[in-house]
Image (cartoon, rainbow, N blue to C red):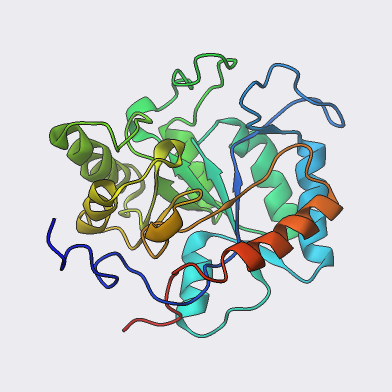
Amino acid sequence: MTAELLSPRALGRTSRRAPWTLMYHSVNGSDGSRDDDDPYLVTVTPARLARQLAWLRDHGLRGVSMRELLAARAAGRRSHRVGLTFDDGYADFRTHALPLLLEHGHTATVFVLPGRLGGTNVWDTRGPRKTLLDADGIREVAAAGMEIGSHGLLHRDLTTVHEVTLAAEVRGSRRRLADLTGTAPEGFCYPYGAIDVRALLAVRDAGYGYACAVDPGPLAGRYALPRTYVGEDDTGPRLHAKRWLHRVRRARLTALPEQDE
């Protein structure tokens, strides 16, 4: 690739710190108990999520969608917001997470898979089958004030697929969600957190305004925003530690500018 394609501007990079963003997946299980059949540790119980959302509120933080978080930063309003994201678009978001978010005054971004509407998480070979949101569920979540983003079509590792498949996963999923919700999604989330320059540029060129990763290292920026994993074991003290660790680890990483250049 040319130096121009790999330039900081092309990758959406600046010298500013990335915003603190929390990464969830499924919300399920009996209140106060762990789901024992959760080998990938992607499930948080409703009781734990409620306590985590209350912790944010008690510490003067409001959980918001990535769309709201980045818009606030662009306008110079950076404080008291933390991004909340839910990957894979599990149907339990509608039944368990959505009521809690609304009760605590938070919003979130849900990254869904329009190629698996109403299907299951077949990519988790060892995990239990979890139902995904169908078209009506996605529209209901959007109508409740949550942001809908793309997680690709079928949850594939974009760093390993052919160019044709890459285009379908990135561009195709955006078109399908635009048809489903009436609005093209602004955000993308890399399945498995897997990212390379080719995938990043495909997302940028498809028209997305930002993309979320997990720990993208030197690629961190507008199209590779780092996030903090949150699980069932994350009590208040652990969230406090993760917030501090984010400040330390991300201080030297490139990130989204506060306003457009």
Q: What residue lies at 60% left-to-right and 62% top-to-bottom?
A: 249
> At x 48% / y 77%, what residue is drawn?
16
Q: Can residue 82 be spotted in the picture?
A: no
Q: Nearer the viewer, residue 160 or 58?
A: 160
Nearer-the-camera pick, 119 or 162: 162
Name which residue lies at 64% across and 21% down.
39
Residue 44 location, x and y as percent? Answer: 71, 35
Does the image show residue 205?
yes
Q: Position of 223 compared to 108: left or right? A: left
Question: Residue 171 at x, y = what percent?
Answer: 22, 45
**Left or right relative to 91: residue 123:** left
- The residue located at (15%, 37%) in the rendering is 163
Towards the viewer: 190 or 66: 190
The image shows residue 95 at horizontal and vertical percentages of: 65, 34
Residue 96 spot, x, y in % from top left: 69, 37
Q: Dividing the image into 4 quarters, which one contains the N terminus?
A: bottom left
Quadrant of the rendering where the C terminus is positioned: bottom left
Total marks shown come to 0
Image height of 38 relative to 234, above or below: above
Is 6 on the left or on the right of 106, as rendered?
left
Res 170 → quadrant: top left
In the figure, residue 7 lies in which quadrant? bottom left
